[in-house]
Image (cartoon, grey):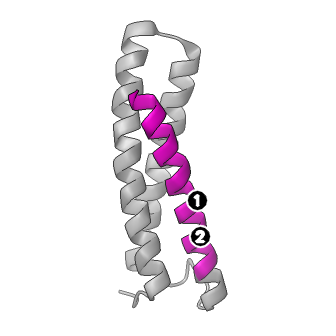
Amino acid sequence: MATMTPYLTVASALSGLNVLLLAALVAVWWRNYREFRTPLTLGLLTFAAVLLVENLVAIGFFFSSSMLYAATPASQMTVLVMRALQFVALAALTYVSMQ
């Protein structure tokens, strides 16, 4: 198992939070799709499911492989920033979807 840097530790935690938000979105959009059967809802459901899988795979790589992310602090900070931006976007989307 690779040693996690502080940047990658925070990035993996953000991926875990993203998984929770995406699970909530999948639940809401699945319920809506069963009720309305619209292509837009199916598209949203597919979007959330794909991002959910992506975040689960990323968590696996965070804990199992240092080869996925370069060893430079700048590249690890970039991974952290991208995970943080995804979290902000998903938090906003989850908030409006729950309304």
Residue sitting at 55 percent across and 48 percent down? 89
Note whether 58 is above or below 54 in the view shown.
below
Element at badge 2?
A: helix
Q: Position of residue 14 (x, y in %)?
A: 43, 64
Q: Does the magenta segment cover residue 91?
A: yes
Q: What numbered label is drawn on residue 81?
A: 2
Q: Position of residue 24 (x, y in %)?
A: 34, 38
Looking at numbered disc 1 in the image, what kind of residue is underneath it?
A: Leu
Residue 76, picture quadrant: bottom right
Real-space CA distance between mark 1 and mark 2, rounded to the nearest whole angstrom: 6 Å
Q: Which residues are magenta?
A: 77-99
User: Do the CB atoms of the residues marked 1 and 2 lie less than 8 Å apart?
Assistant: yes
Residue matched to label 1:
85
Neighbour tally class for label 1: few under 14, some 14-19, many 20 plus, Cα within 10 Å: few
Looking at numbered disc 2 in the image, what kind of residue is underneath it?
A: Val
Q: Front-most of 4 and 1?
A: 4
Q: Position of residue 11 (x, y in %)?
A: 47, 72
